[in-house]
Image (cartoon, rainbow, N blue to C red):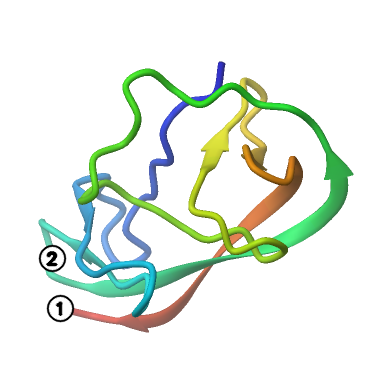
Amino acid sequence: MGSKLQIACPHCGSKDVFYSCEPKCCFNHVCEECKGTFEPVTEALGGRRKIVPPDPLPDCTEPAVACCLCESVAVYVDEDGVLVCADCQATLRLELTELAPG
């Protein structure tokens, strides 16, 4: 079973990060500790594998990212730490962009 996406703040390392927008707009995330912002994106690794979504599913304010291939936000972390899209089964790498200190 996959687990929810957790992203450490690139500014201070805190994992107290929340998603502040909606997928139709952007993927702006805010750190509760330092108020820094960033946007995660994915890059395809070239592999495919199945993943079972976590139960319960993430809340709408928890960290989220879109699959770069199918744009689904059903991206979870597999047991070995690799990101996998539950919809298209792509294996993905996470990158952080639009870094802005708080």
Circles 1, 2 touching at the beta carbon (< 8 Å):
yes
Give the mark, 1 or 2, whose residue is nearer the N terminus: 2
Q: Vertical placement of 59 versus 22: above or below?
A: above
Q: Amino acid at mark 1?
A: Gly
Q: Residue at x 23, y 40 (%)?
A: 59
Image coordinates of residue 67 in percent, x first then y, are 61, 58
Image coordinates of residue 40 in percent, x first then y, are 47, 66
Secondary structure of residue under mark 2: loop
The residue where tag 2 is placed is: 34
Q: Amino acid at mark 2?
A: Cys
Q: Vertical placement of 81 versus 102: above or below?
A: above
Q: Quadrant of residue 44?
A: bottom right
Q: Vertical placement of 101 versus 23: above or below?
A: below
Q: Quadrant of the N terminus?
A: top right
Tell me the distance, in whole angstroms, between the alpha carbons under discs 1 and 2.
6 Å
Q: Quadrant of the C terminus?
A: bottom left
Is 81 positioned to the left or the right of 25 in the image? right
Q: Residue at x 62, y 32 (%)?
A: 81
Is 76 positioned to the left or the right of 99 in the image? right
Q: Residues within 10 Å of mark 2 (few under 14, many from 20)?
A: some
> For residue 102, which numbered disc appears in the image?
1
Q: Residue at x 37, y 70 (%)?
A: 27
Q: Residue at x 44, y 23 (%)?
A: 54
Image coordinates of residue 28 in percent, x first then y, are 30, 73
Image coordinates of residue 34 in percent, x first then y, are 13, 65
Label total for image: 2
Is 22 positioned to the left or the right of 52 in the image? left
